[in-house]
Image: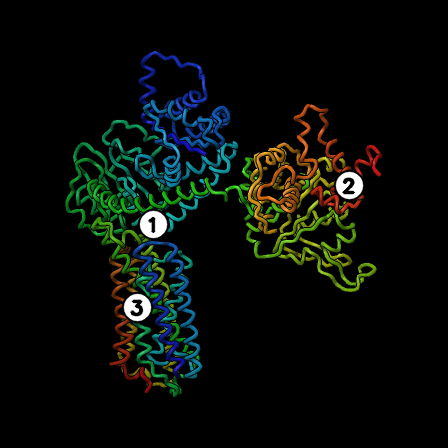
Amino acid sequence: MLAIHFVQWLVVAAYVGALIYYARFFRRGKIMESARAGQLLALAAGLHFFYLIHLAIFTGHLPVTDVFESITTCVWLFGAVYLSLEWRLQERSLGAFILPIIIVLQTASNLFLAFNRELPAILQNVVFEIHVLMILLSYSAFAISFIASLLYVLLSRDIERKSLGLFYRRLPSLAFFDSLSNFAVNTGLVFLTVGVALGVYTGIKVSETFFDSWDPKFIAVGLTWLIYALHLFSRRAAGWQGKRVALISLFGFSWVLFSFLVVSLVFSKVHQFQ
Amino acid sequence: MSVLAYYISLDAAAAEKKARAAGNDDSPTPANPAEALAAILRELIADTALSANELTALAAVDFARLAKATPQLRCEESLLVIGSQFAELYLIEESSENGAVARAASAARPHPAVAALSNQEAVIQFFRSALGWLPNGAHQAAHVETFRRAHALASEHGLTSVALNRLFQRALWLHEKVRLGTDFFQNVVAVDDVLLEVAGKIFGGLKERTALLVGNHAGLPRVVKSLQRAGIGHLYFAPAGAEKSEGDDRLQRISSLQDATQLPFIDLLLLFDYPGPNIFTRAYLQKLMAARHQAPLLLADLSAAATREGMQKIYNLFYFRRGDLEKMVEQNAQVRQQIDAEVAAWIRAEVQQFYQWLTSADRFHFGSMVGRSRQMQQVFELIARIAQTDITVLIEGESGTGKELVARAIHQSSNRAPRAFIAVNCGALPENLLESELFGHVRGAFTGAVSHKLGLFEEVSGGTIFLDEIGEMSPALQVKLLRFLQDGEIKRVGSNAVLKVDVRVLAATNRHLQTLVHEGKFRSDLYYRLNVIGIQLPALRERPEDIELLAQHFLRKFAGRMRKPVAALSPAALRQLRQYGWPGNVRELENVLERAVALTGSATIDIIDLPAPLREPARSTNGAARLPLKEIERQYILDTVTACNDNYDEAARVLGIGRTTLWRKLKNYLETTGDFE
């Protein structure tokens, strides 16, 4: 028990260490430092993976059954997705913005994680686990899109002001963030759709009356899906580009965070399985 | 060693040329090297109307001419770089006694287009130039490329050597350091470059993008050129009014701009001076943006009177006036100053390091080899360059010149240094034994092969194997070695299994391998496979300037080892050492000094401590019958063998040559005259 607490805080420390390097790289632009930052993040993600396995063995199930378990899994997926993108695109300027989100969420998870060993029968189900993993993957993709959109807005502000700020100096290009954000939203939308479909399937299998009452969680997820569908639609059908689309993505992920934390914890009843 | 750099402003040179053509033209024939150089420079900078390509071609031609001129100048190394604004010429001379550089400097100074820098300043300029940092403080990314091409060309023509190559390597390293550690190469300071940078920040790559240039301006060709260099996808041009403008034949033309909906494919819209009514109104641009579904557009107004307000308010339209760009340049310039100062400090450190290297004794050491002569310096440089590769190297040199030391130095400077290095003397073992030694054997392969045995090739896996006296190898083994060199595969004796091993082969011979090839004693295919890179080690008598340095080196070594306070060589002893023919090369010198240090009773080694042949005044100087070197060598060897009571081991040691070498020589004497024994 003590060991697992130690490991969970070690994970946060490793993420903080990586953030320091990413921030230093962003400020000074020394490419040598960025390589070390990437290595440190990979180390942190490895440590995090170790922690997740530890957690799974300790509780006897995948860490996806309540909000704070899901958060730490989601954070790990997010870090891993980002790392793979970083290796593929060889662009490390996003790290300094992604890591704060990771650190805050992981800290929250560490503080409130219940180490719950008893599980309702409804959750002991492979389809359910895939359902949650899919949704978490989609959230990770939306988070990437969020960061890309944020940097799009910041860079475009620097360009419009014609000032050679730090964002102007360090960030690659508007086109880069635009396509990265769009790619992430498209991927996330696919995962979300599959995840929701699996959720509905599980729900119906569990009880005929599962969807009779309107749980706020269902509404929240539906809204998330609608927001990102609008993102896709605005680009494909209306031909929107640039800041407007970025703003939709910013709003979308803010809503995801809100629904993930507030709606699940405060309002949800049916989806709590208690 | 002195270094001189000229830099020649091509614009000023052209003006000078024009002025001179106006007056009467009488170019006198070059009388001395300095004037010859000045004439070359004057011709090189004749005409700046030449394009960059033509200048490069001219440079290629003149490298040949320069190669001819440098011996006249008594400069050992030279490098000519012809950039778009400046030409640079670097000269390095070994000793400043000749004063060629100094004379050249004073001769070239009066020329208004030429500035001469010497020594430290010249080296500073070398590093700056390698970073694309021009003498006038401007930064030109393209100059880095030009500089590297010029160095490659010069080294192809044999104009560069130890010092310039070292400088160049350091400059490459510095370039990486600067690129990774600072914004030196990002931070641009010209309006065109800032424009390109902004375009890059918006669009990323420009490959898929289309630019439209409207109007005429003096700066237009430059913008076109920099856009093309950035790899713009399409370039359209709409000239102002109906008049013809120069330089537009390469660009596609757009005749009518009236209908904005016809232009949705334009991503960069650059406005220059444009007479007549202004058609790029707010309404026009809104229509254009609508036609392109609000995709980002970069509108840059580079005309003198650019005051279009309200453009900022259009969604996804990035509007820049010339003034905005200039302001950005100004901001950049401030940051630039700090970066420049930092890089300048690095350059100073680099220059200091170079001068330290120049004056230090390290320069004459490589591995455990010592040599200040040009030949040895070139060998050192070659070793340093090829060590990192896995190329097979053939080392040729008389016995005692240090072939194994070269092999060791190559191994030590390579990535294989932590792994094994094994030296095998191919002349020392009978054929069959050598084969099982090199490739190993399996149990029962031959009588006495009672167990498996790993060959040296397998044992040094990942390391280096040094095959000495490769000329002595039997034809059958040569085939096996060739197979290894071609496929990296070996077979143990008595086994059919093919093994892949990763071993670097270095070979050496003290016989002229090519004559063995002609005589059919050595396979020609193996010869060419071995001789990918050949290192010819000069005999000691070919580099008398190294004798003193080597003698001092061995003196220190043996005095330390024998704990004797022997500190110096007497001038007379040194003279004797210099006059001697050294048939046994460095190894003989080493043995002579070991003997001398062991025998001497004083702190200084005198003639009396030298062995007999060295005590006599050199034969070549006293006018006695001059004998061919071969004959002297023969006599000396036979004398020594007799003195050692036919103990060949002892004789070989005294002579400072290998036992096999001694044996071969003796056999040779027997064959030719039959008079030994």
| Mark 2 belongs to chain | B
Q: Give, as a three-letter code, the residue at label 1.
A: Thr
Q: Mark 2 points at which residue?
A: B643
Give the vertical position of A29 relative to A274 (above or below).
Answer: above
Write down the residue under mark 3. A101
Give coordinates of residue A274: x percent, y percent. Answer: 32, 87
Q: Type of residue at label 3?
A: Ile
Decide which of B217, A116 is in the foreground and name it.
A116
C-alpha separation, residue under disc 2 versus residue under disc 3 = 89 Å
Q: Within 10 Å of the Cα at label 2, are there few (<14), some (14-19), or many (20+) other Cα atoms?
A: few
Q: Secondary structure under badge 1?
A: loop
**B618 up-or-down from B653: above or below:** above
- Residue B259 placement (x, y as % from top left): 23, 40
Distance of label 3 from label 1 (alpha carbons):
29 Å
Q: What residue type is labelled 2?
A: Ala
Q: Which of B490 and A87 is in front in this view?
A: B490
Residue furthest front as drawn: B601
Q: Locate the C terminus of chain B and report the quarter of the image it occupies.
A: top right
Q: Which label belongs to residue B182?
A: 1
As measured in the structure, the alpha-carbon distance from the residue carrying label 2 to the one carrying label 1 is 70 Å
Mark sitting on residue B593: none
